[in-house]
Image (cartoon, helix red, strand yellow):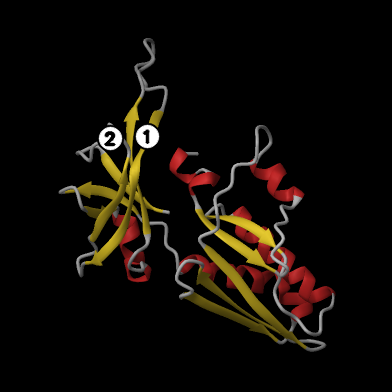
């Protein structure tokens, strides 16, 4: 996995218990499955918290992402909260993602089924997909020091990019080649710094402003950018 997609560099979300005033096994199962699904997609860094704001890191998180070495997590940038409404056969879930610094609601997603017994897993995936669609993983080439030109297969997701979204600037260089086969051993990725989206152009280009450029790093023809 490229270092820019490793756990510690991902957008960090604090996942709070979903409110449910008629809690039962179905609602608890839905919450657990949603939490697990978000982790498995490896798009975000998910930090599970209960509603008393005490951090809980489930064993699943340790086993899947930290088989060796210390746990390396980031301060959460957003919090995910929501509520579950249910009856004997129906279940409706509404979640919202709120920016911790500004208290702005970044996105709100919902799902409903009248057959929670047979459609629970399907509806968990549906809700997770809606959340991920609101935060597309745009990757592309940096041009003119402040423009990101998305790769062709990412252009269709530009409409979901929000202003002030965080951009990781990086460079990937091929490592030395095998003397026998002539093939490179791999590629080395170096993070150059961070920026935020300042303007979204009609042709798909993202104009950004640099927030932090690491000492000794430069933006050049080898530079790329990816949404955090």
Q: Quadrant of residue 27?
A: bottom right
Q: Secondary structure at mark 1?
A: strand
Circles 1 and 2, Cβ within 8 Å, touching? The answer is yes
**Residue 48: horizontal and vertical position, in percent?**
68, 59
At a point 59% along the width and 69% down the height, the residue shown is 80
Q: In this rendering, would 21 be left or right of 122?
A: right
Q: In this rendering, would 186 be left or right of 98?
A: left
Question: Who comes first in sequence, dot 1 or dot 2?
Answer: 1
Disc 2 marks which residue?
Answer: 217
Number of residue marks: 2
Q: In this rendering, would 120 be left or right of 132?
A: right
Inter-mark Cα distance, 1 to 2 = 9 Å
Disc 1 marks which residue?
Answer: 190
At a point 25% along the width and 54% down the height, the residue shown is 148
**Residue 102: horizontal and vertical position, in percent?**
45, 71
Which quadrant is home to the C terminus? Answer: bottom left
* Residue situated in front as seen by the camera: 216 or 114: 216
At a point 73% along the width and 49% down the height, the residue shown is 60
């Amino acid at each position: 996995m490229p270092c820019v997609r490793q756990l510690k560099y991902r957008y960090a979300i604090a996942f709070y218990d979903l409110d449910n005033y008629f809690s039962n096994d179905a609602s608890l199962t839905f919450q657990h499955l949603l939490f697990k699904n978000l982790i498995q997609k490896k798009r975000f860094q998910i930090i599970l918290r209960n509603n008393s704001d005490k951090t809980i890191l489930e064993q699943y998180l340790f086993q899947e992402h930290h088989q060796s070495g210390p746990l390396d997590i980031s301060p959460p940038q957003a919090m995910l909260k929501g509520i579950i409404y249910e009856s004997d056969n129906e279940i409706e879930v509404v979640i919202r993602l709120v920016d911790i610094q500004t208290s702005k609601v970044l996105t709100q997603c919902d799902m409903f089924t009248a057959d929670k017994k047979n459609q629970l897993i399907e509806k968990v995936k549906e809700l997770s997909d809606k959340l991920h669609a609101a935060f597309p993983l745009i990757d592309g080439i940096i041009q003119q020091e402040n423009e990101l030109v998305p790769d062709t297969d990412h252009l269709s997701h530009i409409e979901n990019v929000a202003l002030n979204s965080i951009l990781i600037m990086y460079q990937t260089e091929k490592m030395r080649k095998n003397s026998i086969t002539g093939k490179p051993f791999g590629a080395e990725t170096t993070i150059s710094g961070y920026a935020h989206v300042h303007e979204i152009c009609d042709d798909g280009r993202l104009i950004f402003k640099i927030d932090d450029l690491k000492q000794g790093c430069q933006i050049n023809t080898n530079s790329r950018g990816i949404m955090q």
